[in-house]
Amino acid sequence: MRLARQPSAHSLRIVTVLLLVMGVRVTPSPALSSGCPDRCVCDDQLVVQCAGQHLTSFPVDLPLATRQLIISNNRIAELPPLALNYLSDLVYLDCSNNSLTEISESTFGNLRKLAYLDLSFNKLTRIEDRTFGPLASMVMLRMTDNEGLSEIHPEAFAENAALQVLDVSRNNLTVLNITSLIALPTLRSLGLSGNPWSCECDNEDLCLWIHVEGFKFQDEGLTVCGTPLDMSGRRLGEVGLQLRSLCHQALGSWDYIFFIAIGFVIFAAGTVSAWVMGVVMVLYERYLKAKDARLHPSDDDDDASSVVEVPVGGGGAGAARSGSNHGNGNLKTSHVV
């Protein structure tokens, strides 16, 4: 049996020229449309390997169908959202050991299929609100060894319902608001060791959570207090119950100041209210007296007349009338009689 002869390179060139002449456009596969970036290796499994190539910027000309991108161990300072979001089929992204200083929500705006993300060994300082919001399929997130990372927004993971593994070990975290973490239905592993955790009332919820669900913390024995000094080195899960009783029973200096201030305000308000009520009552009493005087203007005259005309026997009455007719002298005479 004879095998079919393979077309030669010359024949392929002729076919291509004929297609161009006839106006037929050949659309290459998206995976091949941009080739492979310089100093990177691309394979048939849609894996782009750019690790350890001394890159200072995000690689360009990435295949659009890339599913795994490894750019670790370079000096990349920024992830450009425009270039990254063209990779809508990306499921694995390793950015560890670079110089990234900031990550925003727009960075991963179109990576709906991304399941694994590694941001370890970078220079991140803060994770903003809903930074990972678009990553609805993210299962594992590693953010270890960012020496300046001191704050993670309470809602940073609010939309990552598929998240199962989160590792934020060996950063500079002192407190962690667990509002969005305790709401994640599939979270089963959380790494927190190597941070200078505060074991005071502002971190009570985290300590209690570790105490109750210690099985979720892969390094619970190494997750220890950094401050205050009297608790330094103690496990967070161990001090959870102690903080609960301490923070809800003992009063601090600010509590006493608050109570003193409230007492002073209440005293001042009571004093002013009593003075105002007294003034109002005095004015109201004067008003009633003035009103009564206007309504009964002849009451005083009638009272005076009734006192003068009271009879004290027959002679007295005559003397009173005589005195009214003849003056003071006659009054004296009538009194004698």
Image: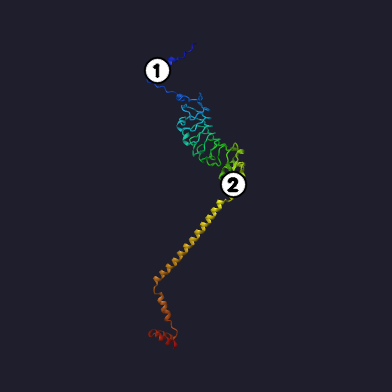
- Mark 1 or mark 2: name the one nearer the start of the chain: 1
Question: Please, what secondary structure does the residue beneath circle 1 have?
Answer: helix
Circle 1 packing at 10 Å, graded few (<14), some (14-19), many (20+), is few
Q: Which residue is tagged 1?
A: 17
Whole-percent x, y for residue 160 in the image: 51, 36
Alpha-carbon span between mark 1 and mark 2: 80 Å
- Residue at 42% in and 81% down: 308
Q: Which residue is tagged 2?
A: 244
Front residue (pair 211, 129):
129
Whole-percent x, y for residue 120 in the image: 54, 34
- Residue 260 visible in this rendered orientation of the protein: yes
Whole-percent x, y for residue 104 in the image: 48, 36
Please give the count of numbered marks on the rendered protein. Answer: 2
Quarter of the view holding residue 228 = top right
Whole-percent x, y for residue 311 in the image: 43, 83
Looking at the image, residue 11 lies above or below residue 238 = above
Circle 2 packing at 10 Å, graded few (<14), some (14-19), many (20+), is some
- Residue at 47% in and 34% down: 107
- Residue at 55% in and 52% down: 255
- Amino acid marked by disc 1: Val
- Would residue 175 be found to the left or right of residue 300 on screen? right
- Amino acid marked by disc 2: Arg
Residue extending furthest toward the top: 1
Front residue (pair 140, 71):
71
- Residue 164 visible in this rendered orientation of the protein: no
Looking at the image, residue 229 lies above or below residue 301 = above
